[in-house]
Image (spheres, helix red, strand yellow):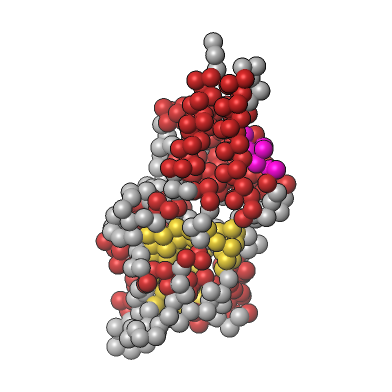
Amino acid sequence: MTTLPLALLTLAIWFTLVLARGNFWQARETDEQLPRYERAGRPQRLRVTAIVPARNEADVIARSVKSLLAQDCDCDFDVIVVDDQSGDGTGGIALQAGGAVDGSDRLTVLRGEAPPPGWTGKLNAMRRGLAHVEDRAQAVHAPSGAPAFSSPDYLFFTDADIEHEPDVLSRLLGGAVAERRVLVSLMAQLGCDSRAERWLVPAFVYFFDMLYPFAWVNDPRRATAAAAGGCMLVERAALERVGGLESIRSALIDDCALGAALKKTGPIFLGLTHRVKSLRAYSRLADIRRMVVRSAYTELRHSPLRLAGAVLGMAATFLAPPLLAGSADAATGLVALAAFALMVLSYRPMLRRYRLSAWRGLFLPVVAALYVAFTIESAFAHWRGKGGAWKGRYQAADGGAS
């Protein structure tokens, strides 16, 4: 039986991806498209409050807090860290970091509580911070001893393992105000220092951009929606319109769920950046494996049929071209080789973004096979009731934390 039809299918897949998938592979949707915020001519001084859920982040929280308090933006800005039942002194270290940069007056550290049924741990911590914001806004009208903080116009949700350059908030706010976007999100630059990171991290971003083409996310006419949880500026009024965090309380992939909810109320933006950096090191293959296993099957909506489709799709897209390129049938080999060439060339912009050599694209099928294996393992973890494992919690077993 000839394998030419399969080779033609793989070539058709790659022509479709390269020409009709929002140019995802070019990695052009970046924070360079966002203007810096300019208050000139605006009578109202905007207020932004950052909410940082933090669980056992003693090794990175200081750098994260300092980078937030160093933001250079013409607005009123403060930071709330929610210490989500940490056992390593995260809250105290955050307070010390605030004092070290004379930012104690703009920093609040709250103690989190165990998530109630139906809530994931991170979203529950974010809810704790948001509740404090709302309580504080109500208290501002008290006759005496009123706090200095009014209700924020925007909420800046970020993670405790993220470091921001000083102009990040200005660009987020500029992008939100200039184009009236209800959500502006940047995908943090992941570390690419270890051997495992150099091989797997660029592919992770590449696959994410393939799944949610950023150009489609940023197009108000398209339904595609996503966000990156490490850096999200949200219009508070829009969040209220979609029912607040309660509307996504059980979502393990909370950032994309929030992006989908908010896009129904207005335009959103998602872009790549070098200005927002992840402080989380993935030194070993096992570290990246755990990250993917945690949520991959959730992305497939816990559906065995979707899992089978994803595995077959990845095999036809990434594994078939190099395997068929060595076929004894000349026509099959040439067609498969063309598909393989498109694959390698499409990966080059992402490798360049991470300052890696283009030859690594030749091994993208091997990397894709690893991600397929991680996805299958994610399904088995869910079936064993161990889905969504993160820092001692299993958050995908029943839709919430356990």
Residue at point 34% right, 71% down? 134
Q: What kind of secondary structure does the magenta stretch mostly adopt?
A: helix
Q: Position of residue 202 (x, y in %)?
A: 61, 48
Residue located farthest toward the top when viewing the structure as drawn? 1
On the question of residue 15 being in view, the answer is yes
Image position of 328 with respect to 350: above or below: above
Q: Quadrant of the N terminus?
A: top right
Q: Quadrant of residue 320?
A: top right
Residue located farthest toward the bottom when viewing the structure as drawn? 144
Image position of 318 with respect to 276: above or below: above
Task: Please tell me which residue lies in front, 54 or 287.
Answer: 287
Residue at point 51% right, 56% down? 28
On the question of residue 393 being in view, the answer is no
Residue at point 65% right, 41% down? 361
Task: Please tell me which residue lies in front, 271 or 260.
Answer: 271
Image position of 203 with respect to 218: above or below: above
Task: Please tell me which residue lies in front, 330 or 275.
Answer: 330
Q: Position of residue 326 (x, y in %)?
A: 66, 23
Disc tally is: 0
Asked whether residue 363 is drawn in magenta, I would say: yes
286 sits left or right of 17 in the view? right
**Residue interval drawn in magenta:** 359-365
Q: Position of residue 222 (x, y in %)?
A: 33, 50
Residue at point 65% right, 62% down? 59
Image position of 334 with respect to 100: above or below: above
Q: Position of residue 390 (x, y in %)?
A: 54, 47
Q: Quadrant of residue 289?
A: top right
97 sits left or right of 154 in the view? right
Asked whether residue 288 is drawn in magenta, I would say: no
